[in-house]
Amino acid sequence: KEDNFWEIGAGPCGPCSEIYFDRGEKYGCGKPDCKVGCDCDRFIEVWNIVFTQFDSDGNGNYTRLANPNIDTGMGLERLACIMQDVGNLFEVDTIRNIMHKVCEIAGIEYTSSENNSDVSLRVITDH
């Protein structure tokens, strides 16, 4: 249950499975034991499947749902990063075009760093 069970407080919940994509060594940390769950960027979760079977009362009590189901979701932005082999959402072609326009309007160059202006540009672009 610790690793493969989805719940958020009270409500529908159940076992889950996550699908990861191996982006390759260039995104990895270089450690020989690098694997899914490593803090590096090599393995990226792209899909989550929840086999919704129970209703939780939020206090550790579960009852079976009358109509169990499967809830699935894929990260579209993550898929775009994989398909375009880029490091993050702001390098995806469609988002990059928005970022360029924001930079033009703001009169600031984006440098892909963690400085305040780049963080601000990413926040504006994302919204």
Image (tube, grey):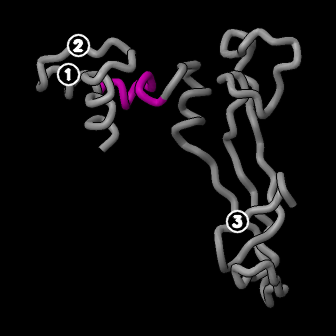
Task: Residue 124: give x, y in percent of width and height.
Answer: 26, 37
* Depth check, front residue: 62 or 12: 62
Crowdedness near tag 3: few (<14), some (14–19) or many (≥20) residues, C-alpha within 10 Å: few
Task: Residue 126: give x, y in percent of width and height.
Answer: 34, 39
Callout 2 secondary element: loop
- Is mark 2 in CB contact (under 8 Å) with mark 1? yes
| Residue drawn at point x = 59 percent, y = 35 percent | 79
| Residue drawn at point x = 75 percent, y = 57 percent | 49
Callout 3 secondary element: strand
Distance between mark 2 and mark 1 Cα atoms: 6 Å
Q: Main secondary structure of the magenta part?
A: helix
From the viewer's perspective, is residue 100 above or below residue 6?
Answer: above
Q: Is residue 98 visible?
A: no
Please name the amino acid that badge 3 sits on.
Asp
- Is mark 1 in CB contact (under 8 Å) with mark 3? no
Give the mark nearer the N terminus: 2 vs 1. Answer: 1
Q: Which residues are magenta?
A: 89-98
Q: Residue at the front extreme?
A: 59
Task: Residue 71: give x, y in percent of width and height.
Answer: 70, 65
Please name the amino acid that badge 1 sits on.
Cys
Indicate which disc residue 71 carries.
3
Label 1: which residue? 103
Crowdedness near tag 2: few (<14), some (14–19) or many (≥20) residues, C-alpha within 10 Å: some
Distance between mark 1 and mark 3 Cα atoms: 38 Å
Q: How many marks?
A: 3
Label 2: which residue? 109
Task: Residue 31: give x, y in percent of width and height.
Answer: 81, 12
